[in-house]
Each structure stands twice: as C-alpha cells, then as structure tokens.
Image: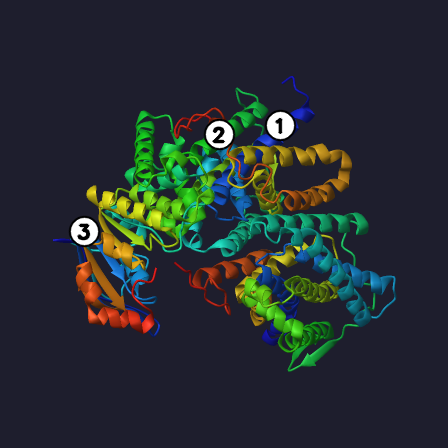
C-alpha cells in the first residue's frame, strides 16, 4: 500500500472503532440498555476468530463471520436472564459478565491463559487496512438502515417508554435480546479484525477500559445517532495515535477531554440531530423510510 | 483454620465496605455511579503513604491526613465534573466520572511512577495473635476495628445530625427535599466528603494490608466495591457493609480452596447471581414501576 | 356476542381491592364510557384489559377468547389499542415516527428487514406502514405536523397524537384513558367528533373520562364504578338520574366536575 504506515495504523484504529461504536450504539443508543461489558463480546469474537485462523486456516471472511456469530450466541444466552434487569443493574451485570469472561480466558488452556495468542497475518486479496475501512462503512450503512426500519423503531420505542412500546404490540423482551445479539455480533467482528490486524491478543486487552472506550465513542458523538457514532469513533479512534507525541500525558488529556466534552456538550457532539432527516427537511422532501442511503 | 480464613475474609470485606459506602451514598442521592471513587481511594492510599514515609507521622495521624486529602479531592471532583451535569442525562455524568477516573489514575502514574510502592518498614508492627487456635494478624484486627469505628461514626452522623437527616431526606426524594428548603447542593457536597473520607481510610488500610500502593489500584477495588454496594442493595448503608463483607469472605474462601486465579470472577459471579434472583440486592427496597 | 366481556373480575394489591367482582360487556361498535370518582378503579380496569395487570380472579374475554394474563404486546396484536392517562409518547421522535411505531403490528419484517432494506417486499411494507401512519395522523388532524417533534406539541395535541398512534394499530377495540383531560372546550368538541368518526370506521371505543358533558354527549352507554364496584350501567340519561350514582359523586364531589 502506498499510504504511510502511520496513517494506515490510524485508519485501522478508526475503522475498528467505528464497527465497535456502531454495534454498541444499537443496544445502548437505540434500545437504551446500557452495556458496560461490550469488551467481553469483542474478546469472544477475537479469540474465536483467531483460534479458527490458527487451528483451521479458515479464510478471513469466514473467521470474521464466526467471530461475530459466537459472541452473538453468547449474548443470547446471557441476555435471556439479564436483560430483564433495568438501567444501572443491567450495566453492572454486563460489567460483571465481562470480568468473568476475562478471568475465564486467562485460565483456559484453549486461549493460552495469560500468554495470549499470536495470530498469523491473514492472506487477503484486498489489503487489510482497506478491508477494515470497507467493513466499517458496511456496518455504518447497516446501522443507518436499522435506525430507519420497523425493527429500529421498535428499539427506539423500547428506549423511550417500554410500557407504551408493549401497548403498540412490540415484544419488548424479544427485541431487547435481538438488539443485544446484533450488538454483540458487531463487537465480535470488530474484535476479530482487531486480532488479525494486531497479530496478538491477550485476555487482559479486553478489560473494563475497553468497554469504556466504546461507550465514550458512542456518547461523544451523541447516543443513538449513527453519524454521531461515526464521528465519535473517528475522534477517539485517532486520539490515542494523534496524542502519541504527548507520550505518557495522552491518557491524562483523554480523561480531561471526556470530562470537558460532557460538561460542555452533555448530549454528545451530534446528539439530537438526525442528519438524514435534517437534510431531507431542508430539501423539502419527506424522508423515505426504506433504502440504505445513510 | 476456618476461623482464620473467616477473619481474613472479613478484613478484606471491611475494606470493600469502606469504599462501597461512598458509592451507595452518592448513588442514593443523585443516582450516579461515581466511577472516580476508586481513584479517590487510590489517592487516599498515596496520601497516607507519603505522610508516613516523608511526613514521619504515625499510622493513625496519617490515616486522618489521608482522609482530609481525599475529602478535598472528592469535593473538587464533584464540583468540576458532576455538578455542571446535574440536569444532563445520567449517562453523560457517568462518562464524565469515567473521564475523571482515567485522569486521576494517569496523574498518579506520572507523579508516583508505574510501580507499586510499599509502606516503610515498621509502619504498623504486625504480630500474630492466637485466638481460639487461629493465627490472626494484628493488622487484620486493626483493619476490622478501624473500619468498625468509622462505620459506627457514619451511622451516628447519618442518624443523629441535621445534615445526616437532610441526606436521608434527599435520598428518599431529591426533588421533594429541595422543595422543602433543604440545601441539596450542600447535602451532595457533604455526601461526597463522607464517602471520600471512608474511601481514603480504606485505601490506607489496603495499602498497609498488602504493603502495596499503586496508581491502578483504584480500578479493580472500585469495581468490586461497587459490586458490593449493588449486592447489598444500592442506596442502603447497612447493605454496603453486608455486601462488602460477603464479597470479601467469598473471595478468600475461593482462594483458600485453591482457585486463586479465579479470584476476580468469584466476586462477579456472586453479584450476577444475586441480581438475577433479587434485582434490588440483599437489603434493597423494591420499587414497583408506575403505569 | 360482545367484543369485550369481563366476568366477576377482581384484583387485589396487597390488602387493597382495587376492582371487586366487576362484570361488564362491550358490544362491537359501541362507545362505552367508564366513569367514577378518583380511585374508583377505572385505570386499573384498563390495565387489566390491556394485560398490564393480571386479575386475582374472574375472566376477561376478547372476541370470545380468554385474555386475562396475556402480555400487553399479544393483546395489542389481537387488536386492543390504548392511550394513557399520563401521556406516554416517544418525545424525542417526530409525529410520524411515533405513529409509525404504533403501526408496528401491521408489519412483519424485523431484523431481516433492517439487513435487507432494499428488498421489494420490505419497501412495500414500509410504504404501507407509512400510509397507515399518515392516515391515522389525518384522522386526528395532525397530518400537517408530521415532521415536528412530539415534545413540541401542545397538551391537547399530544393527547390526539396518542390516539393517532393507537389507531395506527388498526385496533378493533380502542381504550382511551381521560382523552379530554387538559383540553379547552373547542378541543373537546373536535375530540368528540374524532371519536365518533373512529367508531364510524368500525372501531369499538371504551373510554375513561371525568368530563360529564363530554361523556354524556358521545357515549352509547355509561358504566359507573365506585370503590372498585360497578354501581350503574345504562344509557347516559338513565345513569345521570341514578340515585346511587348521585350519592357516589356527592360523597366525593358534585356531578359535572370538569
């Protein structure tokens, strides 16, 4: 590839961030169910995808698919009991789940305990950075499509008022579970890409701070907003790299930046703005509900 | 042997309880998971360490000094990072809290280095005491007694003083308390001060117990203490104490049975199970949703 | 056969009996009003019929089938729609989105529709839902505000939007919980017309309302609850002159309270 490796690294970091943020946005932004443990799904996706590549030499697209499906199944299994909990209790349960996953992986022979896994560089026809960006684009289009679909409207109704949603005929439990699984699928795909791009994963990489990173991207852009998640992931995906010149000070700046952003713009940068609708209204057309245009 | 492990567990649990109290009181009043609370605990531990090592104070004076430092820090954090967000969504406040947490732990790393530091030799002469055939360390007794005294003091403040009554009123119904003329901002500041003081005490005690103080000690202790608060029933002061002790004993039992590398999972497995069976925690009130 | 029938329905919360042995039938195409002093059990009865509460004893039938204990979303699918006494809109969304959500049961594409939004079948369904939603907004006279956020509406308009959202479900039975509350006289009058129009389209209406003039004006039948017990059931004129009803109201406050 002709692009400078440093830029490539930033683009990859942004691309994976976008996938993770759009995924989390579906359960937390659209459905209103706060997850503080999405790093667990990322971890499950990373390890299952990496193990498939290492053990079976599966082509990357199939590994990515598996890296999404396995955490989605995990989300269905875990979500069934815990999605009945509301608000902060759900958040704490997801956090607890993530810690448990981390400890389990640190103790499993399969995941090579605390040593982590080295993942061979996959052979792909498209260069890996480009693949990451294409995946990020696809996920963003999907997220926008969800938002303007019957499925997405049901999720937003649940977020706004569960009782009113049920009165409109929406099966709240089933929709929450589906949203959770979709969200975990995307986190897993993100994790699987992360594993293959970095070439090395360790269970400790997917701790609480990773979940916080994802949440910060979503909240920064504006909860529930698809362009917001894109923007948030771009800023925070690039921030650690761009702030690298500050060396050890960068986490200090990152922390302060989060506080300042929340204090001055508590609903996120694009919170409350629906870009599609904004543009449509400007052009005097009612928004079409279907079609995948973001 | 069992008694010995039990004392081990209770001592560890007492430190969780001291941190958990701050979470539960703040949550009870402004429904905020104060994620920076773990860092207040860490700051208290460092303050205690510095006061002993460079201030040449004895442990109890250093404990008091550390509590004072954390109180100021806790009030400052509330003022800068949470107060402007009182009317914003709770998630924004949560993110702000996480930002503070990252900021403070990084700051500690820059100031004190990445390696754990120990208290100077002889800070608290630890002796083994033989009680009913169990070897109990005087250090553990110190922790249990200090924590017990602080919790009793908290109980007195909350039950007997004017500001304590205002705290309970605000925790029952924040808006109504404000309408009744209670200065809720003062109540929130006071709650942060109390919670921070207890967390600092916990920090110094943990620092002495494990003879290690490090910049990242707040994250895990904080998460576990929050789990303890939820386990006991968030918003409930006795609940936080009970939850802390249950977690401490469970963890030590797990370690004693040979599952030490599963230690962190034990605490969370209990938490998740309790929440599933009884979502309001062990001593929490049941809230029916209104239609 | 009646569309909705309650037989000896009782519900207790702890020691409190909110509804005690109420039997009630609503025929297809009727407008029935449920009145009674505060705390008479009217909203509780609505919550029983819409599945939010399960009766302690008694049976509730809708279109012949036992529904007591079915979850709310199933009952909505069966054709029972409702509004809420304390308005429950999706405030951040615009009127059209609110109403589209109300049309949820009219569609069937779920997650697959979000993955494959370009499929002709998905697009057709979305078009259908959109039509249904705009039609419902038209019935309550809010079609011109389709793209305004729900939170920007006046109180009376919010109540109308809730009705539109319920109508989008194409219900057979529509439950309105205090639809005229907070409306001025003109708004109430146009609300009355809307309710009659809804009935004319074949929807059965059961409503709770405090405004006696409104109730007497549009109802075919009035049912009076007091302390969870049914004390009267008949044509508006009969109920108004019923001594037990007058007693129940005078015990609390005068008839005709708005």
**Residue found at the far top of this picture:** A2
Does C109 appear above or below A258? above
| Residue A187 as seen in the image, left or right of residue A5 | left
Give the residue at x 62% y 76%: B159
Image-based side of C255 in relation to A143, left or right: left
Describe the element under mark 2 as helix, strand or loop.
Answer: helix
Q: Which mark is residue B76?
A: none
Residue A58 in the image: above or below residue C184: above
x then y, percent, for residue C58:
21, 65
The chain under label 3 reads: C
Per the image, label 1 sits on a secondary structure element best described as helix
Q: Nearer the viewer, residue C145 or C71?
A: C145
Marks 1/2: CA distance?
A: 25 Å
Which label belongs to residue A276? 2
Does residue A57 appear in the picture of this structure?
no
Q: Residues within 10 Å of mark 2 (few under 14, many from 20)?
A: some
Disc 1 target residue: A11
Q: How is the image coloured?
A: rainbow
Looking at marks 1 and 2 on the same chain, the residue that comes earlier in the sequence is marked by: 1
The quarter of the picture where residue B20 lies is bottom right
Q: Position of residue C227 (x, y in %)?
A: 29, 71
Q: Position of residue C151 (x, y in %)?
A: 46, 44
Is A229 or A162 nearer to us in this picture? A162
Tell me the residue that label 3 is attached to. C30
Q: Quadrant of the C terminus of chain B?
A: bottom left
- Is residue A185 visible in this depiction of the protein? yes
User: Considering only vertical position in the picture, is C10 above or below A39?
Assistant: below
Tell me whether circle 1 and circle 2 mark residues in contact (CB < 8 Å): no
């Amino acid at each position: 590839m002709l692009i400078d490796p440093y830029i490539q690294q930033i683009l990859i970091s942004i691309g994976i961030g976008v996938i993770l943020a759009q995924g989390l946005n579906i359960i937390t932004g659209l459905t209103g169910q706060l997850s503080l443990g999405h790093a667990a799904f990322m971890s499950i996706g990373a390890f299952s995808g990496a193990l498939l590549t290492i053990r079976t030499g599966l082509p990357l697209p199939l590994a990515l698919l598996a890296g999404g499906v396995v955490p989605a199944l995990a989300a269905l299994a875990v979500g069934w009991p815990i999605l009945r909990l509301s608000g902060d209790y759900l958040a704490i349960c997801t956090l607890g789940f993530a810690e448990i996953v981390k400890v389990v992986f640190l103790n499993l022979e399969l995941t090579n305990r605390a040593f982590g896994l080295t993942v061979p560089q996959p052979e792909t026809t498209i260069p890996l950075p480009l693949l990451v960006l294409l995946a990020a684009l696809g996920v963003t289009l999907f997220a926008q499509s969800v938002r303007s679909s019957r499925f997405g409207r049901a999720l937003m109704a649940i977020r706004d008022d569960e009782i009113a949603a049920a009165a409109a005929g929406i099966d709240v439990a089933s929709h929450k579970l589906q949203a959770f699984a979709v969200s975990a699928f995307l986190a897993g795909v993100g994790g699987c890409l992360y594993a293959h791009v970095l070439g090395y994963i360790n269970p400790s990489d997917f701790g609480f701070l990773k979940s916080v990173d994802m949440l910060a991207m979503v909240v920064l852009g504006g909860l529930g907003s698809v362009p917001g998640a894109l923007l948030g992931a771009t800023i925070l995906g690039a921030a650690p790299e761009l702030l690298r010149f500050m060396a050890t000070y960068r986490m200090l700046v990152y922390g302060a930046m989060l506080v300042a952003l929340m204090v001055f713009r508590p609903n996120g940068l694009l919170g409350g703005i629906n870009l599609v609708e904004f543009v449509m209204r400007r052009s005097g057309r009612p928004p079409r509900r279907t079609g995948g245009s973001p | 042997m069992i008694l010995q492990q039990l004392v081990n567990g209770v001592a560890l649990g007492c430190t969780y309880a001291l941190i958990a109290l701050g979470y539960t009181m703040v949550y009870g009043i402004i429904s905020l998971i104060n994620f920076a609370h773990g860092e207040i605990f860490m700051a208290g531990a460092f303050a205690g360490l510095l006061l002993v090592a460079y201030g040449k104070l004895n442990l109890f004076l250093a404990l008091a000094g550390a509590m004072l430092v954390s109180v100021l820090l806790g009030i400052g954090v509330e003022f800068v990072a949470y107060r402007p967000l009182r009317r914003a969504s709770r998630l924004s406040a949560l993110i702000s809290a996480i930002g503070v947490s990252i900021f403070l732990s990084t700051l500690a790393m820059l100031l004190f280095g990445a390696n754990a530091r120990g208290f100077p030799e002889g800070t608290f002469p630890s002796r083994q005491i033989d009680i009913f055939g169990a070897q109990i360390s005087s250090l553990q007794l110190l922790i249990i007694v200090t924590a017990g005294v602080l919790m009793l003091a908290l109980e007195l403040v909350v039950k007997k003083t004017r500001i304590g009554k205002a705290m309970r009123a605000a925790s029952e119904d924040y808006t109504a308390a404000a309408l009744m003329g209670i200065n809720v901002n003062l109540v929130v500041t006071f709650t942060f001060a109390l919670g921070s003081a207890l967390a600092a005490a916990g920090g110094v005690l943990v620092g002495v117990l494990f003879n290690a103080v490090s910049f990242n000690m707040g994250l895990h202790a904080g998460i576990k203490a929050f789990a303890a608060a939820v386990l006991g029933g968030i918003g409930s002061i006795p609940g936080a104490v009970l939850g802390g002790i249950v977690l401490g004993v469970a963890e030590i039992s797990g370690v004693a049975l040979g599952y030490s590398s599963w230690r962190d999972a034990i605490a969370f497995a209990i938490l998740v199970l309790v929440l599933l069976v009884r979502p309001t925690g062990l001593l929490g009130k049941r809230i029916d949703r209104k239609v | 056969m009646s569309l909705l029938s309650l037989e000896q329905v009782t519900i207790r919360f702890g020691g409190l009996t909110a509804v005690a042995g109420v039997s009630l039938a609503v025929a297809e195409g009727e407008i029935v009003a449920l009145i009674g002093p505060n705390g008479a059990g009217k909203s509780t009865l609505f919550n029983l019929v819409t599945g939010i509460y399960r009766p302690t004893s008694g049976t509730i039938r809708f279109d012949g089938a036992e529904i007591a204990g079915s979850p709310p979303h199933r009952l909505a699918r069966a054709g029972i729609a409702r509004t809420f006494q304390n308005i429950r809109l999706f405030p951040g969304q615009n009127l059209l989105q609110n109403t589209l959500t109300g049309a949820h049961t009219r569609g069937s594409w779920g997650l697959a529709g979000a993955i494959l939004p370009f499929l002709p079948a998905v697009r057709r369904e979305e078009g259908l839902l959109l039509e249904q939603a705009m039609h419902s907004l038209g019935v309550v006279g809010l079609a011109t505000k389709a793209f305004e956020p729900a939170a920007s509406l006046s109180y009376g308009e919010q109540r109308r939007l809730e009705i539109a959202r319920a109508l989008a479900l194409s219900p057979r039975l529509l439950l309105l919980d205090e639809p005229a509350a907070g409306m001025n006289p003109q708004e109430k009058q146009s609300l009355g017309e809307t309710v009659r129009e809804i009935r004319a389209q074949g929807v059965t209406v059961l409503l709770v309302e405090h405004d006696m003039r409104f109730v007497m004006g549009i109802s075919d039948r009035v049912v009076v609850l007091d302390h969870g017990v049914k004390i009267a059931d008949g044509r508006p004129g009969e109920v108004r002159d019923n001594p037990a009803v007058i007693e129940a109201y005078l015990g609390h406050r005068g008839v005709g309270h708005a």
